[in-house]
């Protein structure tokens, strides 16, 4: 595809981009081939313009934060990957923490702690970005983003408009949100309502959560966190464990022995390996329990 309209803008405005670049380093699974174009906007205005140009010219594109719940195809992704990692500003206003879409969740928790604000401790150690967490309603240890989210400023690419989405308008329920399946709606910045607390108590809680994560999750291997959504009233990891699938390996990927809900990239895993292993797990669980597992991770092909 001819990306001239986009590359002309990127070159003229000195926005960093790469052609035919590797995608595996963009995702926590470390799985993927190449992409036609990888773009790194530095500002909200640049991100908005890149989205506008891509939409108007019919370019295939995906917006990516830290890539912690996704993986790319083994071959070439025939589109533009728009990476938000440079949009990472975090600041506080009283009891509110404000963060751009590319900001690290762990860094947000740290900034909150440093300012004596509690409520974000559960996000400490999650390797994702604010944009992804807001879109997926990230949760851990009985808390979720929806518990603390006040509002988000979003861009509607279809209508080329920027507006504020209130907490209820995010339309959260079981790993679904207003952003689900809608690539034209992109979170730019979010505001979180927190509470005043004791800095050392907050630090201790964060440390405890991190310790619990390291004990229960395979943090020493590349992965994308929980592969499947939680079935209503059940736990995917428990179903997979009870089916005896821990350790099941296909090519370079394997069901974690530590946490059955995780698939890990043990050695040079490929998207082909991962897709086959996911399908095997779904078939076995369907046969053994009658439960249809649904992927939480996103495949970009």
Image (spheres, rainbow, N blue to C red):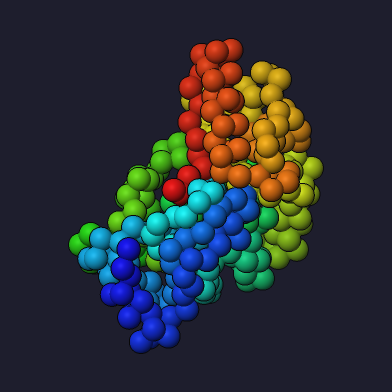
Q: Position of residue 228 (x, y in %)?
A: 54, 34
Identity of the residue drawn at 69% across and 48% down? 268
Give the left or right position of residue 192, taking residue 114 as reference.
left
Q: Please tell me in which quadrant of the rendered image residue 117 appears.
A: bottom right
The residue furthest left is: 159
Q: Position of residue 212 (x, y in %)?
A: 76, 45
Q: Say above or below: 98 vs 242.
A: below
Give the left or right position of residue 254, taking residue 97 as reference.
right
Identity of the residue drawn at 35% across and 45% down? 181
Identity of the residue drawn at 47% across and 60% down? 35
Q: Position of residue 148 (x, y in %)?
A: 49, 54
Is residue 235 something one can see in this rendering?
no
Q: Position of residue 197 (x, y in %)?
A: 64, 62
Along the viewing direction, whichever of 100 and 13 lies nearer the viewer: 13
Q: Say above or below: 30 vs 226.
A: below
Identity of the residue drawn at 48% across and 45% down? 299
Along the viewing direction, whichever of 60 and 178 lies nearer the viewer: 60
Q: Please tell me in which quadrant of the rendered image residue 81 appears.
A: bottom left
Is residue 55 something one can see in this rendering?
yes
Give the left or right position of residue 135, taking residue 247 as reference.
left
């Amino acid at each position: 595809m001819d990306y001239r309209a986009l590359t002309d803008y990127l070159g003229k405005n000195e926005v960093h981009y790469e052609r035919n670049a590797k995608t595996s380093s963009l995702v926590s699974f470390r799985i993927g081939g190449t992409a036609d174009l990888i773009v790194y906007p530095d500002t909200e205005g640049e991100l908005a313009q890149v989205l506008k140009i891509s939409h108007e010219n019919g370019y295939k594109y995906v917006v990516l934060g830290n890539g912690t719940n996704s993986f790319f195809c083994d071959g070439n992704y025939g589109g533009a990957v728009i990476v938000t990692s440079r949009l990472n500003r975090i600041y506080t206003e009283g009891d509110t923490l404000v963060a751009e879409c590319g900001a690290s969740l762990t860094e947000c928790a740290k900034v909150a702690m440093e300012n004596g604000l509690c409520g974000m401790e559960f996000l400490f150690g999650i390797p994702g970005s604010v944009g992804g967490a807001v879109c997926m309603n990230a949760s851990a240890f009985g808390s979720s983003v929806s518990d603390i989210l006040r509002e988000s400023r979003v861009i509607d690419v279809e209508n080329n408009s920027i507006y504020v989405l209130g907490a209820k308008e995010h339309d959260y329920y079981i790993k679904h949100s207003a952003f689900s399946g809608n690539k034209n709606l992109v979170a730019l910045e979010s505001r979180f309502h927190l509470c005043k607390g004791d800095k050392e108590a907050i630090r201790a809680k964060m440390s405890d959560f991190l310790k619990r994560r390291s004990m229960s999750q395979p943090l020493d291997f590349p992965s994308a966190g929980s592969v499947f959504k939680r079935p209503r009233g059940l736990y995917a990891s428990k179903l997979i464990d009870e089916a005896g699938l821990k350790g099941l390996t296909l090519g370079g990927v394997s069901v974690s022995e530590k946490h059955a809900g995780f698939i890990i990239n043990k050695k040079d895993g490929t998207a082909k390996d991962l897709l086959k292993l996911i399908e095997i797990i779904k078939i076995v669980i369907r046969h053994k329990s009658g439960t249809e597992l649904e992927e939480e991770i996103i495949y970009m092909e």
